[in-house]
Image (cartoon, coloured by chain):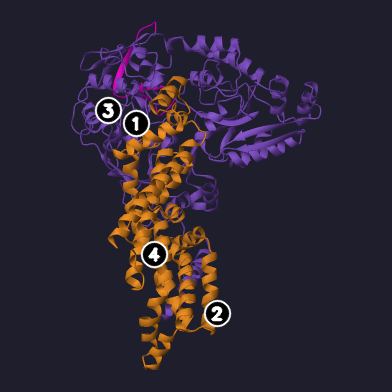
Amino acid sequence: MRSMRSLGGIVAAASVLLALAGSPTPASASGSHSSGVFTMDFASDFPTLDPAVVQDVQSNIPMDGIYDGLVTYATNGNTAKIIPDLATWTASTDGLTYTFHLKHGVRFSNGDPLTAQDVKYSIDRLTSWDATGTNGPSPFGSDFSDIVGYNQWFNNGKQPPASVTGLSGITTPDSYTVVIKLSAPQAYFLNEMALPSAYIVDPKVTAKYGPSLYAQHAVGTGPYELLYWHQNKQMVLVPNPYYQGSQKAQLKKIVFNVNVQEATQFLLFEKGQVDMIFQPDSSTYLAALQNPTVAKTYIKNKTNAVWYLAYNVTKAPFNNVKVRQAINLAIDRQQILKLVNGRGIVETQLLSPAMPAYEPSMKGYAYNPAEAKKLLAQAGYPKGFTITLAYTSARPFVETVMQNIQSQLAKVGVTVNLHDIPETGTYWPYTMDTTQNWNLCWTDWWQDYPDPQDFMFNLGSGLSSNETGGWKNTQFDNLVTEADNLPASQDQKRWQLYDQAQQIWFQQAPWVTLYYPVWDALVQPWVEPHNANVLLHPVIGPQIRLFSVKSH
Amino acid sequence: MLQYIVRRLLWALLAVLGISAITYVIAFGIPSNPAKMIAGQHATAATVHAVYMQLHLYLPLWERYILFLWGMLHGNFGYSYVYHRPVLDMVAAAAPATLVLALAAITAELLIGIPVGIVSASRKGHLVDSILTILTLVGISMPTYWVGMMLLLGFSFKLGWFPMNGYSALGVVLPALSVGITGSAYYARILRSTMLEVMHNDYVRTARAKGLGEWRVLLHHTVRNALIPVVTMLGLDFSSLLGGLIVSEVIFGWPGLGLLANQAIGSLDEAVIEGVTLYAAIAVVIVNLAVDVVYAFLDPRITYS
């Protein structure tokens, strides 16, 4: 009893001393992890493993191991190139009919053989009015709205009549052939078939468990299968015994621990108990730089994403193009890159560097505050003005960068009032409403697929429901619509049209361009292959199906 | 006594109903568009609209509340916007972990706090008492977050005595301690002051006059009577712990209600927020009823009619 008296104080003091007593232990392998086991931790649980429901990057990681799609992306060379996965294909010259020929002998991890009917089922399920079973349609179902029969099947989100049993545009003449008819040519159709949303599921398993429980019992044709998923604790994958493909599983086990806060992940990484930290946050990144052994494990790779401020062009002062251009000249983007630990590339245009049709010759805005002030005066604002900049502190780096922009713009006489909306559920709808009280808002966009349509249409076209700030330009829209509707065989013409549209866009300055984010990670030296396109594929992200771990 | 319990339970039901309504208004009434969030940033207007209709978001709040109550009676507490799982499942999966942590935390608080309180009271005025008083003050002032991180760094990372994260027998020790170190101070101080009151009573003098040893006087006569305020505090403490310890659970990745609530609040997962709050409210009500019943056994003078 006596020793218990100051137990509290002693315990706390002792650990303070330990904590302060020198740098953390070097990244020596603790020996608790044998070769053939890959461990990765996350700060929160996976939202889902269901292709019809998935819309986040974290879930894509195990799904890459569990599922296959009809097509996928090349790992070496041009990473935007579509290559066969479960099927080869032929396309008609008018771009309206795609015929997929499935590989023979493919089985799901429960032994069920893969048939063409499973493919039809998966896409029908994805595009149905009630794909998620709990909250309505799939986030990406509408991407497939050009498949013939979509409007009847989706039926505006209401249950279709009993006579409509699926997409009439998908037919299966035999067990290994799937024919998909489009109502209009879509050059990026194969990109959509490469989405995780289009992974192929086993109808017997989805029917058995229903939409809300299926994710915990997910079954696919990929090199790995789900051994178990203990919600909020751990997910483990093991090799799929029925896998016949070329990407044979090279790991005995893949372990995902969840609800591990980032600081702990870093300590575990130093001890060698975690093999990869995907997209480390700012403090983890800085801590990594301070430890020479860990600093060597940092890798990055380009991806397609944009980080920017959207102008609200429906009201003053940003209804004036000169003012929009002026503000762009007043921003020192190198300063901003420093704030994000240099983990980005200066943004020069709507398209990002890994996109086809990206124009390296477009240099963007130089940093010229004097010119900015001149333009503002010309536009009728010699003394500057006051505006509101909305953002959400829920996303990494945003708050710091917004504060920096506030101080940068003060130098040209523009007073920025910052308005933080921490809940993303409230924030996104707010940014979609130009009648709200904001003049500038932070936003970002990460690709669905590496086709220029993804950015040009979604972020620039007046016909898109994702365009922020209300900017519309008929000429731009016409060019983009024309390019969107050309078949894949005419991609050179498409890139020309998109580039013309980009010139208009740049002149009109609907954004304050900031930077292009990159994929990055800390990866232990014993994780192989040492190929950035495998560890951080620009479209797919970490391709765990190709990982191996040597002994350490 | 039985009548008393039944009456209390009926009032409890009313309280829980009231809490469910208030929480519903707060959780679901915040101006937001969950349809847009569920459908995702990349969704088309048609998809967002379909989600909106399927979730009945076009109905006025009070109608949605009635739908919610109706669902509750059928065991349906809604679905998580993020994880798409039934809220009841998620709360039921997280509650046992929090129960374990709450029990461990209470144990740590009592193991530290009660001896400190007793010794402090019995050595009142001496150096020991002053040191302990200062230590308890430090204990109350230290933020749980900081204590948790220090314990993690010292005992887990450096010494490797405990796992750094996750749900396991050894894994409960550090999060429990992080609450125990800071929370024990309350018990120590309360016990000390009530013991000091009790120690001046006649029956204690009588016990000493009878020739009983100091420890027997302390433990049999003094402490038992001084425990009533401690039991009150225990009830409040335990019932609030049952709702989840957000800070400790997040730091140590303990998969309980605190972690669930933290994520739900961050992503405005309204149905989960409602579910966790309801559960916490029910826990508070039940535990406090239990505490009142325990009083009757501790002090025979207390009766309920």
Quarter containing the N terminus of chain A: bottom left
Q: Amino acid at mark 3?
A: Val
Query: Are both tags, 4 and 2, on one chain?
Result: yes
Q: Nearer the viewer, mark 3 or mark 1?
A: 1
Residue that carries the numbered disc 1 in the rendered image: A134
Q: Chain letter for purple? A: A
Q: Pointer 4: what residue? A: B106
Please identify the quarter of the rendering in which residue A420 is found. Answer: top right
Amino acid found under the numbered disc labelled 4: Ile
Q: Earlier in the sequence, mark 4 or mark 2?
A: 4
Q: Do the residues marked 2 and 3 share a common chain? A: no
Given residues B233 and A169, the one toward you in this image is: B233
Q: Chain of mark 1?
A: A
Which type of secondary structure does the marked residue at label 2 adopt? helix
What is the spatial separation of the Cα atoms under label 1 and label 4, in whole angstroms?
38 Å
Answer few, some or many: residues within 10 Å of disc 1's Cα (few below 14, many 20 plus, some between 14 and 19): some
Residue in the picture at 77% in, 23% down: A375
Residue A211 picture quarter: top left
Residue under label 3, please give it. A201
Is disc 1 in the same subunit as disc 4? no
**Residue of label 2:** B130
Magenta residues span A72-94
Query: In the picture shown, does residue A5 fall above or below B160?
Result: below
C-alpha distance separating marks 2 and 1: 60 Å
- Indicate the chain on which mark 4 is placed: B
x and y percent of residue A464 in the render? 51, 18
Q: Which chain does the numbered disc 2 sit on?
A: B
